[in-house]
Amino acid sequence: MIASIHHRVLAATATLVLLASVHAAPVTDPAYADDLAKWRTKADASLTRERGWLSIVTRDELGPGTYRIGSAPDNQVVLPKGLAPAHLGTIVVSDGKARLTLAKGEKMRTVTKEPDDAEEFTARDLVTGASRLEWVTSGRLSLQFVKREDGKIVVRAADRDSPRRKTFAGRLWYEPKADFKVPAKFVPTTQGATIPIANVRGEISYEKVAGTLEFAVNGQKMSLDALDDDGNLFIIFRDGTSNSTTYPPGRFLFIEKPKDGTWVVDFNKAYNPPCAFSAYTTCPLPPPQNWLKGEVSAGEKYAGRKS
């Protein structure tokens, strides 16, 4: 979701203050309410889709070397029993690349938008670049290979029939509130500027920052640093509700670049990172300048559900 680059660091923005939103006005615009409901339905679907976060069942980090993969306990990459054969094949990691060679008689295929474009294989170099992530599949099992910044390869396994995927009751949301959708001024930063972003593993990367959004909620001025996402903005933040009703580490907010030049911050679309639902991912944490002191009681709540 965010691409790491290095060198320059953006200075922290001013301290953020936000009033509690106990008396925030409900949304009364039918068109907006309908649009928000559709957006939230898509947010649910992002979790429950095939190979979505609720289908992930294992995660392994591999350095250079050769690894056996399968459901038998003598493999280095052990998959759940019944999801894969005892010995599916071998993974060779070298120079930041991964090659999957299947055992005799085993076949997998690539996952493509058009089923007719899928390729069946018995051995394949897997795409591990940040710009394109490739899944391969056979039956219930899908595998994804991702290259980390340190050169290690992360292998995730997904189960199409994961019980969590099939029984997911849906995300939990605050009722939409008009006071949490506000116009904003976007102040771009010097091209190439970065800010340090930590993740849940304690690792630090330097991410390209697009600029700062300045706006007001309930009469209080505030600002948030926003990362660049192909011209759109990606924000990682936390607030006072993180200690009670929302995900403790923080939440995400994606803002599309406006066609008319007017930026809008809509906390009704604040959503939880994958780590709120799956133990098999690594999520970025909000930088200190994006810690809101008050409560943003809008967007997605947290019920403690995690695999």
Image (tube, rainbow, N blue to C red):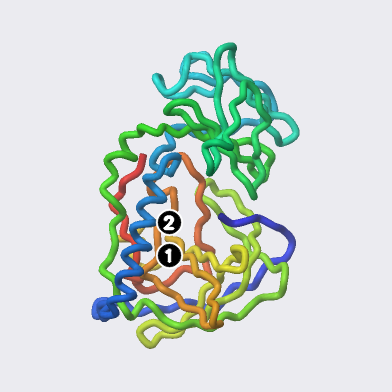
| Amino acid tagged 1 | Arg
Q: Please name whichever residue, 57 or 28, is drawn nearer the observer in this view of the structure.
A: 28
Q: Residue 294's x, y, as percent?
A: 37, 74
Left or right of residue 43, residue 234 in this image: right
- Secondary structure of residue under mark 2: loop
* Residue 272 vertical position relative to residue 298 in the rendered view, above or below: above
Residue, x 47% and y 78% (percent of image)?
264
| Amino acid tagged 2 | Pro
Left or right of residue 258, residue 9 in this image: right
Left or right of residue 236, residue 6 in this image: right
Circles 2 and 1 in contact, beta carbons < 8 Å: yes
Report if residue 154 is visible in the image: no
Residue, x 47% and y 24% (percent of image)?
79
Residue, x 42% and y 28% (percent of image)?
140
Q: Please name whichever residue, 271 or 223, is drawn nearer the observer in this view of the structure.
A: 271
Callout 1: 10 Å neighbours few (<14), some, many (20+)? many
Report if residue 151 is visible in the image: yes
Q: Residue 81's x, y, as percent?
A: 40, 19
| Residue at mark 2 to residue at mark 1: CA–CA distance | 7 Å
- Secondary structure of residue under mark 1: loop
Which residue in the protein does label 2 denote?
Answer: 249
Q: Residue 226's x, y, as percent?
A: 56, 69
Residue 157 marker: none
Which residue in the protein does label 1 denote?
Answer: 238
Quarter of the image for residue 180 reads bottom left
Q: Residue furthest bottom?
A: 219
